Amino acid sequence: MMSNTTFFEKSKEIANDFIQSIVFLDDKAYRNSDNENTAHDFDALKISKIFAKENKICAVYRPESEKDIEDFKSIADKADCVILDWQIDIKQEILKGSEEDDAPYDDYRGLYTKEIIKSILFDEGQQKDSLKIIIIYTGDYTLLEDISTSIYSDVFSSSSEYTLNLKDCSIQSSHVKVIVRAKEVKIAAASNREKYENFMINYESLPSFILDEFTHMTSGLLSNFALMSLTTLRKNSSKILGLFSKEMDSAYLSHKALLPSQEDAEDLLIDLFGDTIADLLLYNKINEEIRGLIQGWIDLIIKIEHKNEVFKKKGKADNITVNYIRNHALLVDLVSSKNKDVGKRYIDAFSKNAGLSKTKAEEYYDYISNNNITTQLFLNNSEMGSQQGIDQRFSILTHHKSLFIPSNTIHKLTLGTVVKSTVVSDKYYICIQQRCDSVRIQQNTDRKFLFIPLKISDGKFDIITPEGVRLKKVNDSFSIRTIKFVCTNDYGVIVAEKDDKGKPVFTQKYTDEQFEWILDLKDLHAQRIIIDYTTKLSRVGLDESEWHRKYLS
């Protein structure tokens, strides 16, 4: 049995395997010690050796001009952990947006550091949503709270996702943590030692500090899966490059030359590369690794709590009350049962581990299953309000193709594209045009596209938007819509253009109605919607002998 400590330690191993690169920016690096300013000195050679012992790539960068700062931004964006000095003393060329002539020294002292943080976490004002640990490693040990407040005010205050914790001198969201810590120096006054020494980190402790902080952000099942997968890809990157060898270029071009639709050759490469990654993860048994961590996660995260549920059952006038203790054994049984009948799996687990009778267990399973709230079993009582949001995020992960779209992507109209009318605010549509009919459109010619209407639903739904709007397809055969678009480019596809608000919009040929791009559905989910729709269209309704109908084979 994996203990909760073991789960965190295993998560540390996974995180340690993943973390490869740490970059430092310090204007005192590579300089001889200045006895008058020892708090700000930085020993680049010593720090490099310490991280080398931990099998980490450590780069120490000393800026001498603002051009160096700009160069460092692109380096920092690629690193797993970024460590920045607060006081960066270089030739001053006041950065754009900070031209106040009377700006006090303390304001501009952290200016470059804040600019670097912004460049790491934001792209044209939009969050990059990448997981990052950023440490401000300063000699100003008496200013840690002031530095934390300054960073929060100038970088994060406009976003409700980030929380300032002055007790820890940190700023955190679900995927970013900025930590302010001091370089180790000797403090003469005993009162100051007690106040500041806990926020000091010596060189030798930096690797373990980074690892602990990173693990606290990633010690979950899905995050561990992602880290192990990325680590496996990194370790096998040379092998992947060897498989996709330039020696096969001639065979690839021969294949392309023989295809009726030559664009399919590039699509094949994407499929091949995706299959290669999937095969690599399967052969490395990443799925089995995660399966082995589940009980440890339950032991660490789940509290043993009393549950009291009162609910109605169809056909019964009186309320049904279920009381039980939600314990670890119950949840372990639910996620490790060999019973393929899900209903019996739940009934057996509750009867065995929660002390419910078979009847009560069956009634309770019907209640949580019919109301689609089984996720609550894996949430503590204090977290119940987050259930819907968690379920929606997991649904988006499994259904949406457009999770990784860069901000400069040109959106194309194709199978699975969900759009919203700019004329009627609650009118949504999903494109059901097959991919082969969505491409190779001659420039300045039009093509009709097929759409199934989607309506906003409070109950059952087929698609959920990134904003959490639930959409259900309209199955009426007369509701299907044909819209004509003109290809305005030589790519051979219908593309969206930015409107005056910066939103990607598809413009149809004849009317003022436009269609805002909302998301791209994954291929198989889009295909399922088409199959469900066409199946309903193919129904045959007729009057016949009921006696005969019941004997139909």
Image: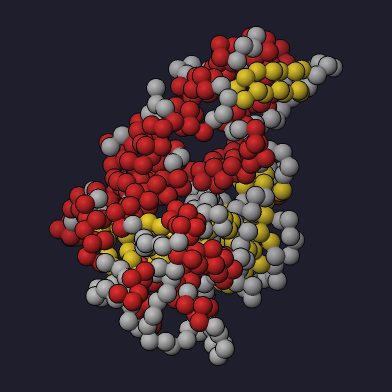
Residue closest to the far bottom: 101
Q: Is residue 306 left or right of residue 179?
A: right
Q: Quadrant of residue 82?
A: bottom left
Q: Is residue 36 visible?
A: yes
Residue closest to the far front: 189
Residue closest to the far right: 317
- Viewer-nearest residue: 448 or 284: 284
Which residue lies at the image location 33% right of the left edge and 66% below the top edge?
Answer: 24
Which residue lies at the image location 53% right of the left edge and 51% below the top edge?
Answer: 174
Which residue lies at the image location 64% right of the left edge and 64% below the top edge?
Answer: 515
Q: Is residue 459 left or right of residue 152?
A: right
Q: Quadrant of residue 436?
A: bottom left
Q: Position of residue 90 (x, y in %)?
A: 37, 83
Q: Looking at the image, is 351 positioned above or below residue 217? A: above
Q: Is residue 403 visible?
A: no
Q: Position of residue 204 (x, y in %)?
A: 29, 54
Q: Position of residue 371 (x, y in %)?
A: 69, 30
Which residue lies at the image location 66% right of the left edge and 26% below the top edge?
Answer: 368
- Viewer-nearest residue: 532 or 229: 229
Q: Position of residue 388 (x, y in %)?
A: 64, 41
Q: Quadrant of residue 519?
A: bottom right
Q: Looking at the image, is 137 positioned above or below residue 345? A: below
